[in-house]
Amino acid sequence: MRQFNPEYIAGLLRSGLPGKESHLKMIPPGRKLAVDLYDTDHLRYSSVLLLLFPHEGKLFTCLTKRASGMKNHPGQISLPGGRIEAGEKPEVTALREAREEVGIDPADVTLLGRLSELYVQVSKFQIFPFVGWTEHKPEFVLNSDEAEKVILFPIQDYLENGKLNHFPVKTTTGVLDVPCFLYENEVVWGATAMILSEFLDLLRRHQFTTSQ
């Protein structure tokens, strides 16, 4: 059995990313990955943190349910993250937002690399996803202004079992039957599912399973 360890995952992130192939598996119907020419001047930039940690013998990450009062994507399941401030490096944004949203101390996080950039057509955000590692499950401190709850998402279960579903969700363009991950009565879809899809595909491509 290959052990989950940060050095191995960092090596995978340097080995070439699945990118578009993985994103298309989870893109909502009618949405596009490419930025329209007339939207290029209106792009906004954000970064998120896919934080990995061992817990109860498995590999987990932290997701949040966005507060219902948030301007963008209220009530959706997301990775900790937010808008990149002027002059701020994207990786600094990811760590800062993780601290503000769920109390993760940046000093406890080792950044392993970055996944592919992702464009969200509805909100016109270009997202930079970073992958981090911490040796233990963090002591989360939830910022209720930004998130309703923290979700410990067992990445390893979805790696081994491929639990991909479709589920109807209400969107700004009506009800869509979206590809998603279902976990604890929550629907993980959209950009978050696309980012998770790429990471899972990266692990599968290198046969990163418990059968080894």
Image (cartoon, helix red, strand yellow):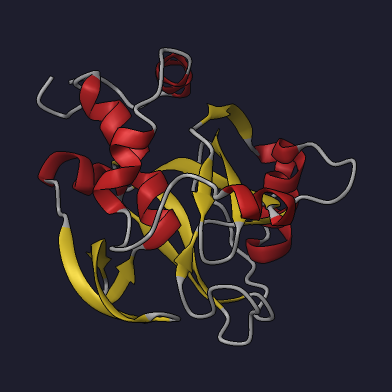
User: In what quadrant of the picture does the N terminus appear?
Assistant: top left
Report x, y in % for residue 153: 35, 56
Report x, y in % for residue 54: 40, 40
In the picture, measured across the screen, residue 152 lies left or right of residue 209, that is: right
Q: Nearer the viewer, residue 71 or 154?
A: 71
Q: Nearer the viewer, residue 149 or 71?
A: 71
Let me know if residue 64 appears in the view: yes
Q: Nearer the viewer, residue 5 or 29?
A: 29
* Quadrant of the rendered image containing residue 201: top left
In the displayed structure, 114 sits above or below 8; it is below
Residue lying farthest to the bottom in this orientation: 69
Residue lying farthest to the right in this orientation: 87
Residue at 42%, 65% in the rendered image: 151
Residue at 31%, 62% in the rendered image: 28
In the displayed structure, 211 sits above or below 170; it is above
In the picture, measured across the screen, residue 111 lies left or right of residue 105, that is: left
In the displayed structure, 112 sits above or below 196; it is above
* Quadrant of the rendered image containing residue 170: bottom left
Q: Nearer the viewer, residue 32 or 51?
A: 32
User: In what quadrant of the picture does the C terminus appear?
Assistant: top left
Report x, y in % for residue 51: 52, 44
Residue at 62%, 30% in the rendered image: 110
Number of marks in the image? Answer: 0
* Quadrant of the rendered image containing residue 180: bottom left
Residue at 74%, 46% in the rendered image: 93
Report x, y in % for residue 129: 55, 41
